[in-house]
Amino acid sequence: MSEQEVPISDDEKKKALQSAIFHLSNQQPFYGSLVQEITVKYTTFIPTAGITYNVKQHQYEIYINPYFFHSLTTEERVAVFHHEILHFTNKHLFRLPFTDGTISNEDKKLYNIAGDMAINQYITGLPKDGVEVKDWKMSNGSPFEQYQNMEYYYDLIKEESKKQQKNKDGDEPGEQSKDGNEESKGTKGNVHEQLDKYKEFDRHFWDSLDEETKKKMLEEAKKIIKRTIEKTSFSHSVVPDSIKDLLSEIDSLSASINYKQILKNTIKRTISCVDRERTWKKPNKRYGAYSPGTKVGSLPKCAFFNDSSGSISIKEQNEYLRMMDEFLKVGTRSCTLGFWHTSLYYKKPYKRGIELDQEALQSGGTDVRCVLEDIKKNNYNLSIIFTDGYYDNVDIKLTNEIIWIISKDGNLDHPLKHLGKTIELDKIK
């Protein structure tokens, strides 16, 4: 029976994980706490290990192959966790998915090597076959420079690969010997040798992401970092500089998210088309009165619910409606416009180009329950709620598509952000 065929009990798997995380927490308290904020799963889907963002579950996950993990010493298991968490803290998971266009499989391989090269210099006790900077030589025979980032090593590998291939093929002259004679053509570097013997240590799923998934990915990263910082602050653990850089990178990437595209895609997906329904009663001259046919189905329904409780100016209300007019050019729709404070006091069919005046709006307290109950009753395909986000929580379950548009200086962390998407008004201008 081979090593991989030896069954591993659930108790053994659990103890191995707990032991590795315990030792990592003792050695690197912040990283150990950060691992505990990420879902760890055993799976045979990958040969070794990996960290990725699960787009369906909207969470970061570390995958561990149980047979690989149990073949390692405790020190090596700790190193594996340290390796995966450094991919996260060094922003590697945000690189490829946030680039435009497609990335070739060859480039994904080089990025994986470069990422491993950048972080392995800071880890002790790694299993064999890991990428080590000291093993890679440039065309002049000197080793790669140490302590650089993933992009640096990626560019260096590509550049040296081309240079050493040219020297090998004899396209460039050899070096001069001490007596002035030209030495034989060739290279002292070993990039191609290292690439040929490279074995994938861990696996990441670096696929292109849409804008909405990027937004959720960044939000989740920030959440787990903040939870880790809060948890470790009680133990006086030092927050690594890479975490500060990561938070800065997340803010920078968040600013580049195309929120306008998120809104446009949602509107197009929910209200830009009309289904046709089949019928067996439409008259047909050839086949008779009961021949098959189709008819126009029901129109998708969209509703705008504007908060007029007092904090949003009439200027901002009209600015918002003008923006919605642009989005509603995408197709046929049946739209309703409602205004609310503690009650839904206005509700009529919406006409593009409407201009509100102050006298048409009422002000008062803020209770969003009236809006949610109307959404549930009328089962709109899409509801867009324009509000400052300052209201009390409401216990209500909805499956409808909802977008919250938050006004300037509004509360982005509003109580019902779990119901649908939240977009800041200034991000879609």
Image: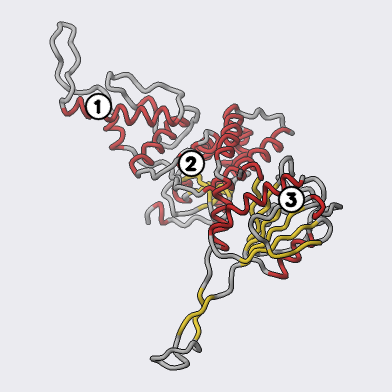
**How far across and how far down the image is residue 389, in percent?**
75, 48
Q: Quadrant of residue 327?
A: bottom right
Q: Residue at x 64, y 47 (%)?
A: 423
Side of 295 relative to 190 (left or right): right
**Amino acid at the residue labelled 1:** Gln
Q: Residue at x 27, y 32 (%)?
A: 193
Check disc 3 and report its element: helix, strand or loop. Answer: strand
Side of 19 relative to 227 (left or right): left
Disc on res. 98: 2
Side of 77 relative to 287 (left or right): right
**How far across and how far down the image is residue 297, in percent?**
55, 75
Q: Residue at x 16, y 21 (%)?
A: 185
Check disc 2 and report its element: helix, strand or loop. Answer: helix
**Amino acid at the residue labelled 2:** Phe
Residue holding disc 3:
387
C-alpha span from label 1 to label 3:
61 Å
**Amino acid at the residue labelled 3:** Thr
Residue holding disc 1:
164
Check disc 1 and report its element: helix, strand or loop. Answer: helix
Q: Is residue 280 above or below residue 112?
A: below
First in sequence: mark 1 vs mark 2: 2
